[in-house]
Image: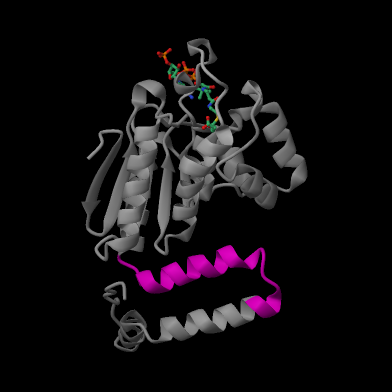
Amino acid sequence: QSETVLATLQAGVLHLTLNRPDKLNSFNEEMHLALREQIERAHHARDVRAVLLTGAGRGFCAGQDLGDRDPRKGGPKPDLGRTLEAFYNPTLRLIRNLEKPVICAVNGVAAGAGANIAFACDIVLAAKSAKFIQAFSKIGLVPDAGGSWSLARILGEPRAKALALTAEPLMAEKAADWGLIWKAVEDEALMAEAEALAARLANGPTLGLGLTKRLIQSAATNTLDEQLDLERDCQQIAGHSDDYAEGVTAFLEKRQPVFKGE
Ligand code: T3D
């Protein structure tokens, strides 16, 4: 297992820590592949019922490792379309398509693709001292890792354009006020709160939570009629789950449900 992503499974929560702290956890190819492998594992493994993503050290993730793009080393100009297709885009799709909750604990600065990978997660908590930077315009690039999509959808064009064109840092509390993340919490409380949330979700009705994620992600592009049809289909599946039977039984017996995730 690569040291660039630390992975431990505890009580249904797959804890993933981006681990290149001396480079603010920026992405090299090894870290890309290690993160992808772990999210694929989360997809297949029944004992993984939630994912908690964070960063080692003082930062969350500074996007692409620019040391690997040093023009002074010579050679042809890089094909960044290829690197997005090969590395960033698969990870974004995997996070969005994983039908299990992905919690992101942004422990420090999140820049470039690092910010946008956080925004792709389902529930994002950030330390109050953390900031989000669309760093791309500082180096002549465009927002990637889904950022142009999520910023425009969540914030609307005026704020999305200002953030992307200026690369001004957005502090965690403002990101929460603007609806980009779930909440900003005191730095010392971040990991405990994120872990408690992940544990709670890992004990939830995983199948239903996954379908809920699918529904909410479909809403922006579906018509109301299409969405009603999808709700019907998802509720049909959820209604056949053991966890639904357990949820109703527990309610009627006035006790806490014990969900198994299926
Ligand atoms: O290439 C493709 O495949 C296309 C895809 C692109 C996706 C992208 O993400 S493009 C955007 C790349 N990221 C950036 O442009 C951000 C660059 N970093 C920064 O602007 C700053 O480091 C931060 C604002 C994130 C944090 O600033 P600060 O002052 O807190 O820390 P620092 O001193 O700049 O960084 C600490 C160390 O991390 C430093 O190393 P050193 O001097 O102690 O040896 C710095 O060089 C290193 N570091 C930070 N970010 C990167 C990095 N090293 C390589 N790549 C980085 N992105």
Position of the C terminus by quadrant: bottom left
In depth, the one of 207 and 34 nearer the eye is 34
Relative placement, left or right, of 245 versus 167 is: left
Q: Is residue 18 above or below residue 13?
A: above
Residue drawn 51% across the image and 36% down it? 83
Viewer-proximal residue, 253 or 244? 244
Q: Residue at x 26, y 75 (%)?
A: 258
Q: Is residue 70 left or right of residue 195?
A: right
Main structural element of the magenta stretch: helix, strand or loop?
A: helix
Q: Position of residue 206 (x, y in %)?
A: 36, 69
Report the residue that reaches farthest toward the top.
72
Residue range (magenta) = 203-226
Residue 221 visible in the shown view: yes
| Relative image position of residue 235 (x, y in whole percent) | 49, 82
Magenta-colored stretch includes residue 219: yes
Q: Position of residue 54 (x, y in %)?
A: 38, 40
